[in-house]
Amino acid sequence: MADTDKTQAVKLKDEGNNAQREGRFQDAVGNYTDAIKLDPSNHVLYSNRSAAYANLKQYEKALEDAETTVKLKPDWSKGYSRKGTALQFLKRYEDAKAVYTEGLKIEPNSDAFKKGIEDCETELSASTAGANPMSNPFTMPGVEAKLLADPDTREWLKDPSYQMLLASLKKDPNSIGMRLQDPRVMKTLSVLLGVDLKLAADADMADDTKTSSAPKQQKPKEPEKMETEEKNLDPNKKKALDLKNEGNAAYKKKEFDTAIDLYSQAIELDPEEMTFLTNRAAVYFEKKDYDACRKDCLKATEVGRENKAPFKNIAKAFGRIGNAYLKEKDYKEALEYFKKSLTEHRSDDILKKKQECERTLKELERKAYINPELSLEEKNKGNEFYQKADFPNALKCYDEAIKRNPDDAKIYSNRAATYNKLLEFNRAVKDADECIRLDPQFIKGYIHKGRNLMAMKQWAQAQSALQKGLDVDSSNQEAMNMLITCRQEINKNPEEVKKRAMADPEVQAIMSDPGMRMILEQMSQNPGAIQNHMSNPDIARKLYKLQDAGIIQFR
C-alpha cells in the first residue's frame, strides 16, 4: 500500500472518530468504510466501524466487523470486547460470555471483561428464572428496584445483614425454605412476587374509574371458622361490618346518599377501620364532592398507619386523592399523591396515571413558555451572531427562539443553516424537515435539506428534496443549480448511489418485504399500476421513501 493511501486512511479514521464523538454515527461508518478501502488489513478500522454500527443499532453488522477485527488481530483484546458487546445486544448471551472469556485470557485484569461475563450470567439466570419465577425469585430482573419501592425492604437494604441474606438466597435458592422463619424472607418474597403471602388482603371498593362495578368480594370463609370469628368479634365491630356491607350494596345501586349514611354509622361504631373511610370517599368521588373525598382519604391514611393496615390499603387512599385532583385538572397535586401511593404499593394503574400527569405537566410548561415576541427577539439576536460567523452563539439564540415559538418554520430554517456551518448535517436535515412540515410552501426548507444531504453525498435523497422544492417555486435558480449537481453525481456512479441508499435500515426493510417486492415487480411490468398502489397511504409512504433513496423513479 502506498504511503499516500495510508496517510489518507489515517485522516479518514480521525474524521470517523470525530463523527462518533459528535454522535454522527452514519457519517462515521462512511469515513471508516472509505478508510478500509485504502487500508483493508487495518484491524483498528474494523473495530471502530463496529462501534459505529452498534451505536446505529445495526448489531449484525457490528458483529461482522468485530469478527474481522479478531481475525486480523487475534491477540488484541479490543476485538473481543467489540464482539462480545455485539453478541450481548443480539441477546446471544452464551456466545458473548465465551467471547469475553477469551478476551480475559489476553487481558486477565480487565474489569470490562469480568463485568461482561457477570452481566451475561445474570441474563442467563434471569431467563431461566423467567420460565418459572418461583425457581429463584431473587435472580429475577429488577430485584433491587422492587425492594426499593417497598418502605419496609427499602429500610432493610441499609442493613448489612439483610444484604448478606439476599446474597445467600440468590446464590442458594434451596435455602429459602429453611429461612422462612425469618420474617424478612416472607416479606421480601411478597414484594418480589407481587402477592401478599400472608393473605392479609382487604376487600375495598371498586376503582374510581369503574363506577358501575360491584365491590370486590372476599372469598367465603368456612362456616365453622366464621362462626368462631363472629363469636369473638366485638359487637360494635360486627355491626360496623354489617353496615359496610349494606353500604356496598347501596353503592352498587348508585344510592349514594344512603351509602354515605351507612358508612358514616360504621365509622362511628369502629373508628379504627380505614376501609370504611375509603369506601365513603369513593361515594363522595362519584358525587363529584372531591374535597370531602380527599378529606376522608387523608383521615383513612392516618387511621391505617395507627392500626398497621396493609400498605396496599394506604396506597389506595393516596391514589384516590390523586384521582380526585386529576378530575379537577390539578395535575401537580395529583402527581404528588400518585407518587405517595406508589411508595406504599406499586400499582400499574397508578403508575400510568403518574406518567400521564408528568407528560401533561411537561406539555403545559412548554406551552406556558411560548412567547412569539420574545421568540422574535432571540431570532434577531441569532441572525446578528450568524452574520458575524459566531455560529455557536447563533445556535443558542435559535434554540431559545424555537422554544418560545415552536411553530415558526423560518427559525428552523435559520437553525438548519447554522447547523450546516457547524458541519452538523444530520441535525440540519432534521430541522429542514420540520421547516417543510410547518410550511410546505417555503422553498428554503427544501434547499437546506438538499444542501445538507449533498454534503453527506446522499445525492438521490438530495435530488428528491430539491425537485420537491422546484415544484413549489420552479424559478428558484439556487435549487436548480443544486439539482443539476446532484444529477451529475448520480450519473457518474449510479451504483454507488444505490449502495448508499441500501445502507439505510428503512430501505432495507422495505426491499426485504415480499409484498413490496411484488408491487415493485408489478409496477415494472405495468407502470399504470402505480396509481392504484398510491391510494394506500402505507404503500405510498414506502414508495416515496424508495424514490427519495434513488431506488425507483416514477415522475
Image (cartoon, rainbow, N blue to C red):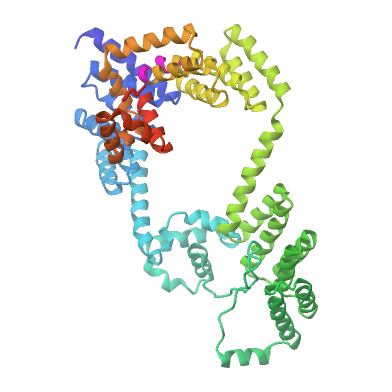
Quarter of the image for the N terminus: give it: top left
Asked if one can make out residue 462 in the rendered structure from this viewpoint, the answer is: yes
Tell me which corner region of the image, top left, top right, bottom left or bottom right, holds residue 17.
top left
Q: Is residue 14 left or right of residue 377?
A: left
Tell me which corner region of the image, top left, top right, bottom left or bottom right, holds residue 287.
bottom right
Q: Position of residue 45 (x, y in %)?
A: 29, 23
Q: Is residue 152 above or below residue 447?
A: below
Residue numbers of the magenta segment? 452-460
Q: Is residue 111 above or below residue 47?
A: below
Q: Residue at x 25, y 7 (%)?
A: 4
Q: Is residue 241 above or below residue 103?
A: below
Residue 307 is a magenta residue: no
Depth check, front residue: 7 or 380: 380
Q: Is residue 164 above or below residue 303?
A: above
Q: Residue at x 47, y 7 (%)?
A: 478
- Considering the whole magenta stretch, tell me its main secondary structure: helix
